[in-house]
Image (tube, rainbow, N blue to C red):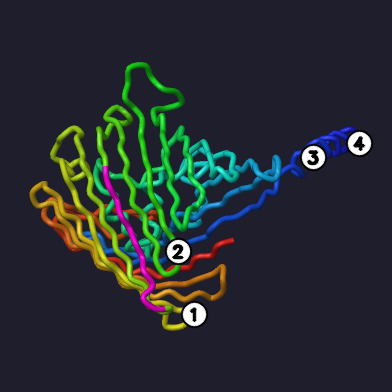
């Protein structure tokens, strides 16, 4: 026992200097909701859902007054089942990098600039009614977190900054004579009442089984008053993948997704939110519309509660739902039906 205690003390002493080199913090989100989901056909059930809940570790270390190293390790946690859904760790944004007056360079696995570009218009992120239920569909979907990525982000110039990312994307190492990479970039602006992002992304045909695809995305928000904000979103995708008859690869050639929304603050703590979106595909009978209404109340800076009602109206060739993205409760939809969801949620950021 005495030898074990000595070994533990020596190990702790060896670790302490390493901890002292970096300012490390633990953070996370516990986000759970109770949802009544109806696909418009046979499914009509109540679910408990964990909504992109996570835990993470991040920190930085000053190398000199003009240069810092930084890192982040983040893992999804399912608060509904107690499982992360895989045997892997660090399944979310995980990276290491350097930052200074030149901007920031980071390497690892993390959200692409294109994915982040929806931010200004993202009123219902990780909730029933998330815009990704229409914007991230089929084999042409984007909003990805790519492996093996190198990214450079410029400093802010008058409210503008540029992010450029390149991913090898195909397993642990590049393969000779195989086009399997992905490129993503965004131009972002935030100053005063206005915020906007314009992004482009291209994925080569052999990067995965979904084929070559590229997309342009624009999102913006503007505070008309201190209490009222309007948002807008537009995305167009081109897809050249393998053709079959399933809904998963119905997005042939061109798909446009766009929408408008708004948020009105009744008080500093309570807000009403609404958004309408539409998906317009050049495939036959493959369009869809989504409407979302919600109310959110912040109990304090860290904890909020909300209630949302969302509907997706599908053409005969679509089977989308307003609950399919960013959540653990994801029953499939029914083609040509109107899927609806009523959700009451609690989110705690720590």
Q: Residue at 53% across / 46% down in the picture?
A: 75
Circle 4 Cα neighbour tier, 10 Å, few/some/many (<14 / 14–19 / ≥20): few
Q: Earlier in the sequence, mark 1 or mark 2?
A: 2
Task: Say which of 267 and 299 sits in front.
Answer: 267
Mark 3 or mark 4, which is nearer the start of the sequence?
4
The 10 Å Cα crowd at callout 2, few under 14, some 14 to 19, many 20 or more, is few
Residue 191, numbered label: 2
Look at the image and give the residue range highlighted in magenta.
Answer: 215-225
* Vertical placement of residue 100 versus 343, above or below: above
Q: In front: mark 4 or mark 3?
A: 3
**Crowding near the residue tagged with mark 1, few <14, some 14–19, many ≥20 C-alpha atoms within 10 Å:** few
Is residue 223 rendered magenta in the image? Answer: yes
For marks 4 and 2, the one nearer the N-term is: 4
Residue at coordinates 56% horizontally, 68% vertically from top-left?
A: 302
Magenta stretch, overall SS: strand
Q: How many marks?
A: 4
Q: Which residue is mark 3?
A: 17
Asked whether disc 4 touches disc 3, contact meaning CB atoms under 8 Å apart, the reply is no
Relative to 2, say whether 125 is above or below: below
Q: Nearer the viewer, residue 198 or 255?
A: 198
Query: Mark 4 — residue?
Result: 2
């Amino acid at each position: 026992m005495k030898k074990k205690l000595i070994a533990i003390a020596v190990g702790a002493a060896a670790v302490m200097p390493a901890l002292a080199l970096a300012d490390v913090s633990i953070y996370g989100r516990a986000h759970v909701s109770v949802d009544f989901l109806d696909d418009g056909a046979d499914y009509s059930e109540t679910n408990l859902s964990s909504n992109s809940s996570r835990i993470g570790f991040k920190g930085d270390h000053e190398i000199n007054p003009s240069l810092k190293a930084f890192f982040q390790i983040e893992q999804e946690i399912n608060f509904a089942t107690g499982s992360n859904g895989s045997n892997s760790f660090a399944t979310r944004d995980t990276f290491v990098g350097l930052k200074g007056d030149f901007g920031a360079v980071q390497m690892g696995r993390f959200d692409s600039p294109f994915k982040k570009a929806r931010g200004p218009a993202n009123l219902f992120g990780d909730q029933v009614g998330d815009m990704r239920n229409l914007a991230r569909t089929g084999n042409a979907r984007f909003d990805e977190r790519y492996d093996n990525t190198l990214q450079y982000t410029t400093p802010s110039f008058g409210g503008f900054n540029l992010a450029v990312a390149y991913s090898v994307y195909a397993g642990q190492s590049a393969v000779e004579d195989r086009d399997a990479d992905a490129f993503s970039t965004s131009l972002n602006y935030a100053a005063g009442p206005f915020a906007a992002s314009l992004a482009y992304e291209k994925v080569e045909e052999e990067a995965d089984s979904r084929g070559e695809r590229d997309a342009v995305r624009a999102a913006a928000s503007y505070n008309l008053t201190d209490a009222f904000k309007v948002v807008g979103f537009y995305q167009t995708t081109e897809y050249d993948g393998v053709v079959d008859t399933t809904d998963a690869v119905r997005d042939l050639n061109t798909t446009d997704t766009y929408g408008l929304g708004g948020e009105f603050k009744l008080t500093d703590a309570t807000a009403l939110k609404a958004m309408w979106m539409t998906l317009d595909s050049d495939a036959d009978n493959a369009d869809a519309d989504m409407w979302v209404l919600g109310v959110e109340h912040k109990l304090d800076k860290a904890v909020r509660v909300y209630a949302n009602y969302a509907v997706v109206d599908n053409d005969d060739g679509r089977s989308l739902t307003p609950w399919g993205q960013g959540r653990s409760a994801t029953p499939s939809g029914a083609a040509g039906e109107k899927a609806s969801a009523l959700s009451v949620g609690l989110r705690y950021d720590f």
